[in-house]
Amino acid sequence: MTFAAKPLDWRSSALRWTDSFAQRLADHEGVLWSYAQPATHKNPRLVGVSRAGARLIGLSADTLWGDREAAAAVLSGNEPLFRGMPRPWAQCYGGHQFGAWAGQLGDGRAINLGEAVSNGRSWEVQLKGAGRTQYSRFGDGLAVRRSSIREYLAAENMHALGIPSSRSLSLVFTDTEVQREEPELGAVVARLAPSWVRFGSFELPASRGDHAACQRLADYVLAHSFPHIAGASAAARYTQLFREVTLRTARTVAQWQAVGFCHGVMNTDNMSVLGLTIDYGPFAFMDAYDPQFVCNASDYAGRYAFAEQPRVALWNLLRLATPFAKLIDCADTVAEILSAYAGEYRRTYAALMCHKLGLYNVAKETDHEAVIEPLLALMERVGADYTLTMRTLCDVPELLARNAESEAIDKIVDRIMAVAESGSNDTAWKEEMRAFLTDVYRPRLLDDANGALSPEDARDIAARMRRTNPRFVLRNWVAQDVIGRAAGGDEGSVDRVLDLITTYAFCDALPDHLKSEVAYGGPVPKWGQGLQSSCSS
């Protein structure tokens, strides 16, 4: 069933609603979901609207800003979008947290308004920080401004980088007091995803021996999110579904590694069956390249360190395999699917890294060991800035094409060293880096260009590399600076930075209204080095 919003002020847009997870799984109320009611928030006000996010569900950012009080009331959960709207709800799921089974979890502070349909696609609209649900346990169901700014910006940044992600619609600040380590003020993020079903959505009913609920959920996921999957039998369809989830997970994690993204809390309840990046908590983009980088201050053992993410994703898939083994009813098939993960991850990661280096034409099995690993090892030795180093390398093909003098190559090496964590003037390292560029990278680049690299070809390669290696990502220090600016009264900085890290994420030239933000594409200031965040939000 599909119905339109009542034609009333900004709500008379093309926004349409259809039966959501709760309506389609009405027979599993209390098992897979429960009704929830957003709290009433004090003085909500609209602070940010993602233009791209709004377009996804047929809304206009300008229209929302034009009626900002009504928009804030709805997008905080204070008022329904229209009279007669379906009741909000929260999803029930379990999860393994830091490697241990945590039992029943669920949406403890995320409340689903329903499913919006636009341009043939549907999006579940969820308010994070909207209030307590049946699954809040000892929590208050609220969110604070600092974590809400981070999630609002991060989801859109990741999408702009081409990485599968949930999306952001809006950011609302409230004057509701939220008690964390100290009193803070609240916020609500309206976020979007085609589906919020997680690995833990299957794990919980399976842990209770509720095979019927697992099967019902799998049938829903197939019909709703994977309509292209067909099979002669239910087991065949479940087999294809598990394979699709496995391969999507491998590809998404490979994209994280290639861009230097660390999720921070890869619990199974934070893993999307669609292969989306969801639940932006203590995430970070790496500054200094360090495979053992841990972005979550609460991850004392380093379980979710940057280099561990591919392994942890497979571990999580092994947990998901338990309920799917019952559905597929063939342990060998499940094992065969899981065995494909490593190859899919490795192929995707190698291709992404080769593209970052301008190698687009000839894929070689040896690229990982011969080119990628030596470069990363050099970067690790001095703590080279990951994003800036990759962006700097975009200048190299044109130098190599014209057989530039060694001084030009030396300047590239000096630029990388200048923003390295070590801050040293390691002569031996500089020589090794220069040798890598001239003796390893240059021959491989020539080979990819069929043995000849003209200046025109080099310019094209460099331009493609600049469209692959971002200039602006939401580093921890950038997020922290925006949080401070918003707290100081410059709330407009939130959407300016949103524009910077989405529309202009790969750009050297900036429009006038963003030129004041150019430092966010530069080196990490001393105060911003080594920042971590925690799950407290």
Image (cartoon, rainbow, N blue to C red):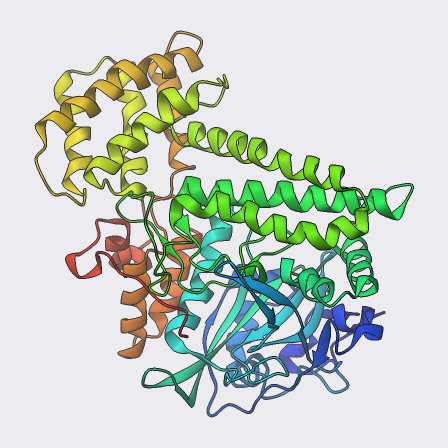
The picture quadrant where one finds residue 248 is: top right
Quarter of the image that includes the C terminus: bottom left
The residue depicted at 21 percent of the width and 53 percent of the height is 524
The residue depicted at 46 percent of the width and 66 percent of the height is 152
The picture quadrant where one finds residue 383 is: top left
Furthest toward the right, the residue is 232
The residue depicted at 27 percent of the width and 66 percent of the height is 481
* Residue 530 spot, x, y in % from top left: 24, 57
* Residue 134 spot, x, y in % from top left: 64, 83
Give the side of residue 134 with respect to residue 303, left or right. right
Please state which of residues 247 and 527 is positioned toward the viewer in this rendering: 247
Furthest toward the top, the residue is 451
Please state which of residues 13 and 464 is positioned toward the viewer in this rendering: 464
The residue depicted at 15 percent of the width and 15 percent of the height is 405
Give the side of residue 313 with respect to residue 505, left or right. right
* Residue 393 spot, x, y in % from top left: 29, 31
Q: Can residue 339 be seen in this view?
A: yes
Is 360 located above or below residue 67 in the figure?
above
Quarter of the image that includes the N terminus: bottom right
Please state which of residues 296 and 1 is positioned toward the viewer in this rendering: 296
Total labels: the figure holds 0
* Residue 197 spot, x, y in % from top left: 67, 61
Give the side of residue 135 with respect to residue 226, left or right. left
Q: Is residue 15 visible?
A: no
